[in-house]
Amino acid sequence: MAKVSHANYMMQLGSYKFSVSSAAFHKLKYDSEYRWETLSAPTDKNSPVMQFNGVGEQSLNLEGTIYPQLVSNGLKQMDLMREEAAKGEPLLLGYVEESGNTSPSVGRVMGKWVICSIGEERTLFFNNGIPREINFTMTLKRYDERKQSK
């Protein structure tokens, strides 16, 4: 028997919730960079000496579709995303994932992220110019919360 998720959203960024009833993403791409420096040192082999300098930039790219006539505040969903981005602050990111036997779904907090870009494409228009479909993209980057020295 398949597990049923009781969460009412897929992912939450700040106060914005991505869901089937608002804006559902259909593609999530997660990229992590790792920093390596090539050193100028003689070696016995043809391979260079490399030194690991830590984890680099981490980014999330979302792609999704909104059907304005089917969701709550359909034409305002992009405005709500942009309002979250315009706060100009790192936002807590959490998403729902399947867990063990005791609970069908749990939240996973992924730390703080910033919205770097939001793209919007409106298609399939009604006679009055209202789109039947809004495709969106969003690029997020992980925010490093290193403590500042005073």
Image: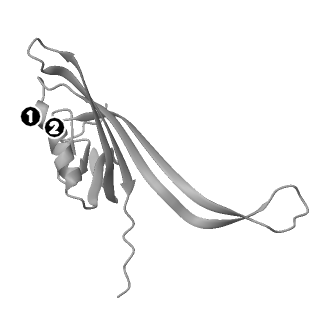
Is residue 109 in view?
no
Q: How many marks?
A: 2
The answer to whether residue 85 is above or below residue 53 is: above
User: Dot 2: what SS?
Assistant: helix
Image-quadrant location for residue 8: top left
Residue at image mark 1? 73
* Crowd band around label 2 with a 10 angstrom C-alpha radius: few (<14), some (14–19), many (20+): some
Q: Tell me if I can see residue 78 in this picture.
A: yes
Query: In the rendered image of this protein, does residue 134 appear above or below residue 116?
Result: above
The image position of residue 86, as x and y in percent, is 20, 53
Residue found 50% across the figure and 52% down from its top:
32
Indicate the quadrant containing the N terminus: top left, top right, bottom left or bottom right.
top left
Q: Which quarter shows the C terminus? A: bottom left
Q: Position of residue 28 (x, y in %)?
A: 38, 39
Separation of disc 1 and disc 2 at Cα? 6 Å
Mark 1: few/some/many CA within 10 Å (<14, 14-19, 20+): some
Q: Is residue 124 positioned above or below 144 on the image? A: above
Q: Say left or right for 9 vs 45.
A: left
- Label 1 sits on a secondary structure element that is loop
What residue appears at the point 29 percent right and 48 percent down from the top-left corner? 95
Residue at 30% from the left image edge and 32% from the top image edge:
64
Q: Amino acid at mark 1?
A: Asn
> Residue at the location (12% across, 36% down)?
76
Residue 108 or residue 43, whichever sits in front: 43
Is 69 on the left or on the right of 58, as rendered? left
- Where's residue 12, x and y in %? 24, 49
Residue contact at pointers 1 and 2, CB within 8 angstroms: yes
**Which mark, residue 77?**
2
The x, y position of residue 131, in whole percent, is 17, 21
Q: Extreme bottom residue here?
A: 150
